[in-house]
Image (cartoon, helix red, strand yellow):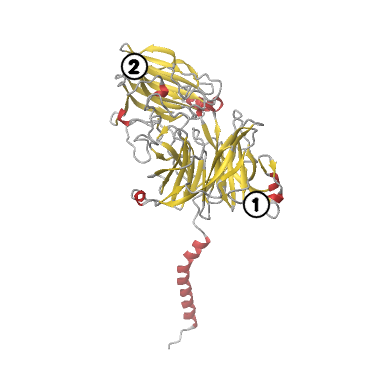
Amino acid sequence: MKKISYPNLIRLAIAVIAIVTAIIAPMLLTKIHPRKSEVTTMLLDNINPITQLDYPDPDVIRVDDTYYMVSTTMYFMPGCEILRSHDLVNWEHATYVYDTLDSTAAQKLEGKENIYGQGMWAASLRYHDGIYYICFVANDTHKTYIYQSKDINGPWEKYNLEGFYHDNSILFDDDGRIYIVCGNKNIYIKELKLIEKSEEEKKNSEIPTRLSDFEKSDIDGLLLSDSDEVYLGYEGTHFYKINGKYYLFFIHMPKTTGKRTEAVFVADKPQGPYFGKDVMDDDRNYRRSGVAQGGIVDTPSGRWYSILFQDSGSVGRIPVLMPVNWSKISVSDLSVVGSTVSNSNATLADENGKVDFPVFGDNGKIPEEFEIEDLKPGYEYTPLVSSDDFKTEYSDSSSFGFKPCWQFNHEPDLSLIERDLAKGTVTITTDKISSNLVQAKNTLTQRALFPGCEVSVTIDVSALNDGDYAGLCLLESSYGLIAVTKRNSGYYLVMGKREIKTTDMWGERHDDEPFEEVECIELNSPVVTLHAGVCFDHKTADKIVAARNEADKPSLIPYTDDTVSFFYNPDADHLKKLGKSHKLEFKLDHFTGARFGLFIYSTRKTGGSASFSNFIYE
């Protein structure tokens, strides 16, 4: 064998080291320098209220890098809207769970029937073993509905549970058991089962199982009760298992404060006993309206947040975001409806007599600014309200082919709606006699934006019958409207209002009275552009008004809270107010925030129609 000289040996060693380094170095570098995270943490102020729209009773979950939030939609169709976010601050439409619910006469506004203040309420949204579950009740049918799907965009399978579970929350425990908790003042638990579907059911389904409440369980029964010293007893349940403990979140309204308040209870078993206290008593200095009822959710990094809602006047109930931290708290500081629980009775405590307990915001107060995590930086969100030229037919996650920001007041009759995509018109025809706006079928609505906003729409009423009304409204029980009517073959523009004069919040769900006509003028053309400006909070709406004035585009937003004003174009260059500003009021008869609506109804003869175009939302 030929010997290698010492210098050549050195050269060979250097070469081998270079080759090995070239192979291993990238792996070492990858290990030492991990890929930069795509999650961005930001300190934001003026976060709340998020959405600035009527999205009450929120429940929120996270699946990977996406948050989903479900909200009450009541009598609007399509229903059970789910929103999507990657940072919990900005939200966009994801999907509707159903187009129609049960198509009852009341859900379709047949005759004088309706489901105002009823319909789909307070859903529980869960994701378990690759399947999304939604559970809610409808107070018009007195049924509990389950929808399930492998994809958040559907298709969704529908079935019913036997019981009626008001304001429910479902928990899939890590031992395989499933529970539903619900109630008002008295809170109950019921065990559910995941059962195999019949062979017939499996034929049209991707999911072989379904939830059932048919079997009785020894765990079923009363969990806890609120005291009698409340205006509103515990409800709006949200049920979680976190780090081995069971947590119940409720809203209630103690007589001592008269404000909506969030309460939390904790136990080491699903059946209790539960120990808790009030954790959130804050109104954000807004109308003494407490923030409460909603869910909590964690981020991938382990931070926690809560989304509750706040009654905000006629605009409705708006979600509010806040951080949630966990702190060790002495169990002796917790109680069961006012009865102090001693450590000796509290098996859930650690060796120091303490248990992990959520702290909302800054010790129960919502901070003005806090950090949030953006799980998808640079993502552009589609607005939840929008202008529309009506020239596009939408398919996925749409509203009967309309932009998903539109919903119909009750179930629509699509045979009475005609769209001309080339012209950008939506023509609605009547087929019933109605006493007023709230009986009108096929009213097309969008939520109104806090703290103030304005819209316009062009309407062609050439095909109206005498006694018809067609136009633009702010829909609620005490509604306001601007509409064209036909009288003695002439066209007239009217501003009208309806004031429900009950002395309580219950209002009048079966209103059969015509609106009060405030002003009426004759038109020289059946085509006119109508405008509405609405203010929900003049202190914060001032900024919008000032910005529009600086842009030399005077705002139509009035300078009074919960007020709408109506305008029209007498010609192409001028804008004129019609009637007086109208006071809006949130009542429990409709139980929803005011919405812009495009409507037509007949008071004498059916078959009249109106065509809407060029809807502008600002």
Give the quadrant of the N terminus: bottom left
State the image quarter where residue 607 is shown.
top left
Residue 525: image x %, image y %? 32, 15
Dividing the image into 4 quarters, which one contains the C terminus? Answer: top left
Pinpoint residue 277: horizontal percent, then vertical percent.
65, 41
Specify the quadrant of the image occupied by residue 524.
Answer: top left
Q: Nearer the viewer, residue 320 or 529?
A: 320
Residue at image position (65%, 48%) is 327
In this picture, residue 263 sits left or right of residue 58: right
Disc 2 secondary structure class = loop
Q: Which residue is mark 1?
A: 348
Q: Callout 2 environment at 10 Å: few (<14), some (14 to 19), or many (20+)?
A: few
Answer whether residue 14 is visible to the viewer in this image: yes
Which residue lies under the disc numbered 2? 604
Kind of residue at badge 1: Leu
Comparing 4 with 515, the one in front is 515
Query: Which SS class for mark 1?
Result: loop
How far apart are the alpha carbons under marks 2 and 1? Answer: 68 Å
Query: In percent of the image, x 36 and y 16: which residue is there?
Result: 485
